[in-house]
Image: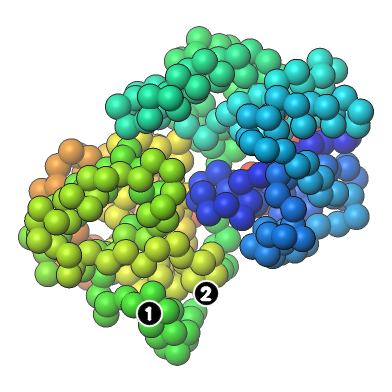
Amino acid sequence: MRIGIDIRLIGKKQTGGEVYFFNLVKYLARIDKENHYLLFIDRDPARDRLLAREIESLKLGSNFKIIYLNSPSRFWWNLWALPNYLKKNPVNIFHTQYIAPFWLPKNIKLMLTIHDISFNYFPQYIKYSDLLFLRALIPRSIRRADKVITVSESEKNSIADFYKISPAKVDFAYNGVEAEKYGHNFSGEEKENVRKKYNLPENYLLYIGTLQPRKNIPVIIKAIKGLNIKLVIAGNRKAHNFDKKIDETVSKNNLGERVIFPGWIEEKDKPVLLQMADCFVLPSLYEGFGIPIIEAIAAGTPIVCSDIPIFREISGDAALFCDPESSGEFTGNISKILSDQSLKEKLIKSGIESAKKFEWQNMAQKTLAIYKNII
């Protein structure tokens, strides 16, 4: 097979979607020496050092080829640059996320990844122009797709129910975690170097992810008022759709000295950051999966998170769950972990069992099987 994969997110610091496609390609390169892959990007690696490093770290074999298509905008890339290339250089399958390319040749099968459809349930947290764009183009893209793939069983059901499509058209493959990397026994010196690099306190709660409104971060900020510990909120503050209520909540509650924003965390430093944290917190209103949760599980860090279906599905008994609207519940459950060592150890032990089913290689193998079934 000739399989085209849209990897434009790689090197753009956009967390979930970037991690998904990076690891899909990385593990396909490990397990598949038979099929041929064209990896499509919209930046020139010769000019983008971060992108070049990321591509190099994929350790691609000779059956993988990078295709750089220059274009003045994302819209024009989908409308003209990519379809025009594929007309002249067809593939059997093209795999992208959310929005299908315009004028994709009919003889090319389309695999569409939809990580989550939170914008349908919390439209108030999406820019109006973005919402119109998603509502107009995603139904069209789903109709064009030969297969829709998502990241959990609960999200598969949500997509099928909301868009009124056959459940047989939707499949899922869990996201993964490099358990060995996150569970590595780091030395005291390695930990201290990371602590200094990001100016971290001795004890802290940790949030890692995007800083969008649906992540519900102000609830955790309010929760630490009743706790004697600092909160580290790691993520790109300049990224799209930053939640302005984060800064407002910090200011309103006079927590400027207790809430720390280290910015974007390099991938190699995330396991250390997680291992040093007293507790990992994720108060999201909606998620398709929640990669940081299984990273925290693999790092041996106890978790307090929202009581939403996907977190129940992936974390099992490895977390304490809270009403996402209640900062008081987060305060109470975090306090339990900080004060009860036996509870903390119980959560960590349960997490080790839960983490076994989440491996990137499993995700790549199932995705490859779906490619074969489409053909």
Whether residue 176 is visible here, answered yes or no, is: no
Which label's residue is closer to the chain start, 1 or 2? 2
Q: Is residue 162 above or below residue 11?
A: above
Name the residue: 40% across, 63% down.
263
The residue lying toward the viewer, choosing from 292 and 106, is 106
Gap between marks 1 and 2 measured at Cα: 17 Å
Left/right placement of residue 273 relative to residue 103 reads left
Q: Position of residue 57 (x, y in %)?
A: 71, 64
Q: Residues within 10 Å of mark 1 (few under 14, many from 20)?
A: some
Q: Is residue 26 above or below residue 168?
A: below
Q: Which mark is residue 325?
A: none
Q: Amino acid at mark 2?
A: His
| Extreme residue in the bottom direction | 189
Q: Amino acid at mark 1?
A: Arg
Name the residue: 62% across, 19% down.
141
Q: Which quadrant holds the C terminus? A: top right
Q: Position of residue 190 (x, y in %)?
A: 47, 84
Quadrant housing residue 236? bottom left
Q: Is residue 258 above or below residue 214?
A: below
Left/right placement of residue 248 relative to residue 151 reads left
The residue lying toward the viewer, choosing from 86 and 29, is 86
Pointer 1 residue: 195
Q: Position of residue 147 (x, y in %)?
A: 67, 23
Q: Residues within 10 Å of mark 2 (few under 14, many from 20)?
A: few
